[in-house]
């Protein structure tokens, strides 16, 4: 599609989807992108469940206020708490699974597929629906489908980039 | 450089760096990549401090057991707790800054620049060194420089991708 910067800048959260399935090979490529994320101590404390069965999607949607349309698929991003607890710092494992998720969002966009990370869902209900053992906790849903909308870029906050110390702008005085 | 998948799969954590500066425009492009990450409720609870002054880098290194070499720069990824607390879910803000960080790692790799996310550092010391207000907390360091090593791919855990429910492999029976 384009340079990595164009992919990063062009990606939007898509919440309305076409009723069109995602090919197996594309789904696999999105999932493969996830597992190449960096991971603290190479622990890789993640599990991904790709849900495409319409009945399962409907059940997840019922317990997920953050899902507004019917996606072609949902990737449930989970944390393996047995692995995560080994590092002694549970926040590290959130970094890892978030980076893996960003890889999937970018990969999907490159393939012309829209995504939206969804945090508003009933964790326990999803855990039961997907037969997840107690130590595999669903942390984020990624809804996936061919876009039925073309969202505009959201405004970016300015004043968030500094050089050398807090409050110091770049040489060009630009405030981002 | 290549497709987004090649960038995602090719990126490694680099811990040995050449003594070679990073151009302003490349540094800016890496930082620009960060701010295009998705963010829950578009809160963008992040602040980035790019440190290139050798004296400052040395001071950060002294309080950071996770830094093994002298990088050309360090980007200090911070969380704005005033913004993060508005959502009522502090974990969301970790997702946001982690996704922003992954954008930077990929962008840098595309530019031929190596990076390593570092979580092992004295948070309070870095906060003081960079004049960060109390509500701006440093959460992750990203060391940056032209690579002086070419790390091999780290092994990926298998058995982390399932379809429809936990334990169910893909149609091809492949276990990832």
Image (cartoon, coloured by chain):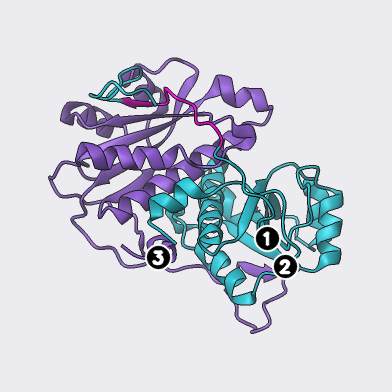
Chain colours: A purple, B cyan
x 80%, y 47%: residue: B64
Judging from the image, mark 3 belongs to the subunit labelled: A
Judging from the image, mark 2 belongs to the subunit labelled: B
- Name the quadrant of the N terminus of chain B: bottom left
Q: Residues within 10 Å of mark 1 (few under 14, many from 20)?
A: many
Is residue B158 one of those drawn in magenta? yes
Q: Secondary structure at mark 2?
A: loop
How far apart are the two marked residues, 3 and 1, measured between alpha carbons? 21 Å
- Which residue does the numbered mark 3 point to in the structure image? A3
Q: Is the Cβ of the residue at disc 2 closer than 8 Å to that at disc 1?
A: yes
Please tell me which residue lies in front, A67 or A10: A10
Q: Earlier in the sequence, mark 2 or mark 1?
A: 2
- Which residue does the numbered mark 1 point to in the structure image? B145
- Which residue does the numbered mark 2 point to in the structure image? B20
Q: Secondary structure at mark 3?
A: loop
Q: Are marks 3 and 1 on the same chain?
A: no
**Displayed quadrant of residue A96:** top right
Judging from the image, mark 1 belongs to the subunit labelled: B
User: What span is in magenta?
Assistant: B154-162
Give the vertical position of B19 relative to A30 (above or below): below
The answer to whether B76 appears left or right of B110 in the picture is: right
Is residue A140 one of those drawn in magenta? no
Image location of residue B171, percent across then percent down: 23, 24
- Name the quadrant of the C terminus of chain B: top left
Extreme residue in the bottom direction: A172
């Amino acid at each position: 599609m384009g340079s990595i910067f164009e992919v990063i800048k062009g990606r939007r959260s898509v919440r309305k989807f076409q009723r069109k399935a995602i090919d197996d090979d594309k789904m696999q490529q999105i999932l493969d992108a996830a597992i190449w994320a960096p991971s603290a101590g190479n622990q890789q404390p993640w599990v991904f469940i790709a849900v495409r069965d319409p009945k399962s999607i409907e059940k997840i949607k019922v317990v997920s206020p953050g899902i507004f349309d019917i996606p072609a698929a949902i990737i449930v991003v989970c944390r393996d708490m047995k692995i995560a607890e080994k590092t002694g710092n549970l926040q590290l494992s959130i970094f890892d699974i978030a980076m893996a998720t960003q890889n999937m969002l970018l990969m999907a966009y490159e393939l012309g597929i829209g995504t939206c990370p969804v945090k508003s869902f009933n964790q326990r209900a999803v855990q039961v629906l997907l037969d997840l053992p107690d130590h595999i906790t669903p942390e984020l849903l990624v809804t996936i489908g061919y876009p039925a909308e073309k969202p505009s870029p959201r405004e970016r906050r300015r004043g968030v980039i500094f050089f050398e110390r807090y409050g110091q702008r770049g040489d060009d005085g630009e405030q981002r």
